[in-house]
Image: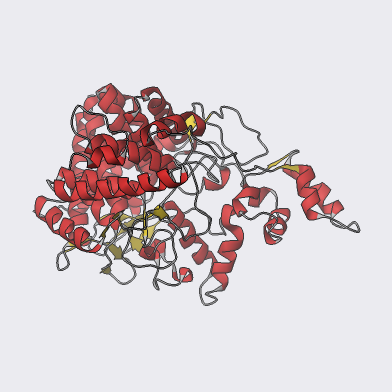
């Protein structure tokens, strides 16, 4: 029987009202550098003093912003004013970290184990004049230009920390995200003031799941309040949404079914990519710049920044329309959040809430399978809100319903066949089938999507394909490590075994989620009761 949207709405309203109360009393949002330092901020970014626009966003003024602005207003009127000199005098600018040189002859596993301390940061206190936000516990950063913790990255980093037996670090990082939920009412993109207007794919429930494999139901009980805050954030505004309306991150389809989209609370250029966004908006003068900025920011919230998934014209970033798209991965993650809330509520003895969240998850699962499953093609897709139809492109996001138990066996089998035919390459799993120059398109493959594929396919008995994807990606990582002595943010998976390209910034070394997924795959694909230290060890059993 088809779930009743009205009943689902009543259930949703009762849950949201109580959860929203938990998240209501949040402190004022700190101002971002582009708010605090204008018009100095725009002048510095416009002068291209730094190769990376994020550098100045991460700089720390040596005095309060008002004082620095007053000094700048005076200095700029003087003959021979030197902007670069002014910035050097009045700001502490982050520099590049020295490259990590591993000991000679280290195995891939040993290299990653040695990187954990290198990538760990502790920022219980921060300079109040800068953009960095404090966190009470140590955390692991991705590396390179990414000097702060990132939300969805961290789940895949945690997989590696768990493989390394670093459960205290896992607990510390989950505690940090719980702290952010308590402090801000959501988990920001990263712990910077300029990331507070958006989140990232909601992986907190999966982090709690992971910790529960070590701590049992106590983990669900401990983080139940924060799980409810997370849900309230993503569902804010849903209780009053009419059919055919969208508000913030919630959309109600014409038939009354409720799903979610990506959003950002601000509609200005991204602080960390200010000039890039101005340039993109200039390429589409027929569009309102505020809508362009909102869509770019929503694309950043998706984690896929950027991809043909969000573009009306695959070759044109200025055609981005993220907020008009209902993504299959986001809604699968929210299904998992609702099932986790049901489990956590039951563990805490609240059976009424457990039943309500179970019902809500069931309604969402039905909506995903009705609206985001393309039966003609045989795979999961995104949906275009404005056109009222699915977007037919096959992307690696199609595997999230398999991974998070939205799909049935028949859907999993058909999806697996499509993935094997169109996305599998010699070096692993492609992100999409089209090459656009954007980093979340072909020929790039990303570690988190390899894990989603391997684990998701295994959950549905597609073990041969799962192993093929995992082994091929491990071989790519191993080849780059053997040649260059490092792991990187993304990889070319067309068989050339190289670091990936495209996007707004150069390839970054480190790298948190590549490290985590590599360790997890080494463990998952190894012969039982053996330790695999390299891709060759895994391949030796084939």
Q: Is residue 9 visible?
A: no
Q: Position of residue 25 (x, y in %)?
A: 48, 35
Q: The C terminus appears in which quarter of the rendering?
A: top left
The colour scheme used here is secondary structure
Q: Nearer the viewer, residue 420 or 358?
A: 420
Q: How many marks?
A: 0
Q: Is residue 457 above or below residue 311?
A: above
Residue 176 falls in image quadrant: top left
Residue most extreme to the right: 79
Q: Is residue 128 visible?
A: yes
Residue at horizontal 49%, vertical 45%?
509
Q: Residue furthest bottom?
A: 286
User: Residue at point 22% right, 40% down?
Assistant: 540
- Placement of 131 over or under 493, stated as above or below: above
Q: Is residue 421 above or below residue 165?
A: below
Residue 459's spot in the image, x, y percent?
A: 16, 43
Q: Position of residue 132 (x, y in %)?
A: 59, 38
Q: Quadrant of residue 65?
A: top right
Is 5 placed left or right of 203 in the picture?
left
Tell me which residue sits at (37%, 38%) in the image: 516
Q: Nearer the viewer, residue 26 or 284?
A: 284
The x and y percentages for residue 198 are 47, 49
Residue 323 occupies quadrant: bottom left
Residue 274 as seen in the image, left or right of residue 183 = right
């Amino acid at each position: 029987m088809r779930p009743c949207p009205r009943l689902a709405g009543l259930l949703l309203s009762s849950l949201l009202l109580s959860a929203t109360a938990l998240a209501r009393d949040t402190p004022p949002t700190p101002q971002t550098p582009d708010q605090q330092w204008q018009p100095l901020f725009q002048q510095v970014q416009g002068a291209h003093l730094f190769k990376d626009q994020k550098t100045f966003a991460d700089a720390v003024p040596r005095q309060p912003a008002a004082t620095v602005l007053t000094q700048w207003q005076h200095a700029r009127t003087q003959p021979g004013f030197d902007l670069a000199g002014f910035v050097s005098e009045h700001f502490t600018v982050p520099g590049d970290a020295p490259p990590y040189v591993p000991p000679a002859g280290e195995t891939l596993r040993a290299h990653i184990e040695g990187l954990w301390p290198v990538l760990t940061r502790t920022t219980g206190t921060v300079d109040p004049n800068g953009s960095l936000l404090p966190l009470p516990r140590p955390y692991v950063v991705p590396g390179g230009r990414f000097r702060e913790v990132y939300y969805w990255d961290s789940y895949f980093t945690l997989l590696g920390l768990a493989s390394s037996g670093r459960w205290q670090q896992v607990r510390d990082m989950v505690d940090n995200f719980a702290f952010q939920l308590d402090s801000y009412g959501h988990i920001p993109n990263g712990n910077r003031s300029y990331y507070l207007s958006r989140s990232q794919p909601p992986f907190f429930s999966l982090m709690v799941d992971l910790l529960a494999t070590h701590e049992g139901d106590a983990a669900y009980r401990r983080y139940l309040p924060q799980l409810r805050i997370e849900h309230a954030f993503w569902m804010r505004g849903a209780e009053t949404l009419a059919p055919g309306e969208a508000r913030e991150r919630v959309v109600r389809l014409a038939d009354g079914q409720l799903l979610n989209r990506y959003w950002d609370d601000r509609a200005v250029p991204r602080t960390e990519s200010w000039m890039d966004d101005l340039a993109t908006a200039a390429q589409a003068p027929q569009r309102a710049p505020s809508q362009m900025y909102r869509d770019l920011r929503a694309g950043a919230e998706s984690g896929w920044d950027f991809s043909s998934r969000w573009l009306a014209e695959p070759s044109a970033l200025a055609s981005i329309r993220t907020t008009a798209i209902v993504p299959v991965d986001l809604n699968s993650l929210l299904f998992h959040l609702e099932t986790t809330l049901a489990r956590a509520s039951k563990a805490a003895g609240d059976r009424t809430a457990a039943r309500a969240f179970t019902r809500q998850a069931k309604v969402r699962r039905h909506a995903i399978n009705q609206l985001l499953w393309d039966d003609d093609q045989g795979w999961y897709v995104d949906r275009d809100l404005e056109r009222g139809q699915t977007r037919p492109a096959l992307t690696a996001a199609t595997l999230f319903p398999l991974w998070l138990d939205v799909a049935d066996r028949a859907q999993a089998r058909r999806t697996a066949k499509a993935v094997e035919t169109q996305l599998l390459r010699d070096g692993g799993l492609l992100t999409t089938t089209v090459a656009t120059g954007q980093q979340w398109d072909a020929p790039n493959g990303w570690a988190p999507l390899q894990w989603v594929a391997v684990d998701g396919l295994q959950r549905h008995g597609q073990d041969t394909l799962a192993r093929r994807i995992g082994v091929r990606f491990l071989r790519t990582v191993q080849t780059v490590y053997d040649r260059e002595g490092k792991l990187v943010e993304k990889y070319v998976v067309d068989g050339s075994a190289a670091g990936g390209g495209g996007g707004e910034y150069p390839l970054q070394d480190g790298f948190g989620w590549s490290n985590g997924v590599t360790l997890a795959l080494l463990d998952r694909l190894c012969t039982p009761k053996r330790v695999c230290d390299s891709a060759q060890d895994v391949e030796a059993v084939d």
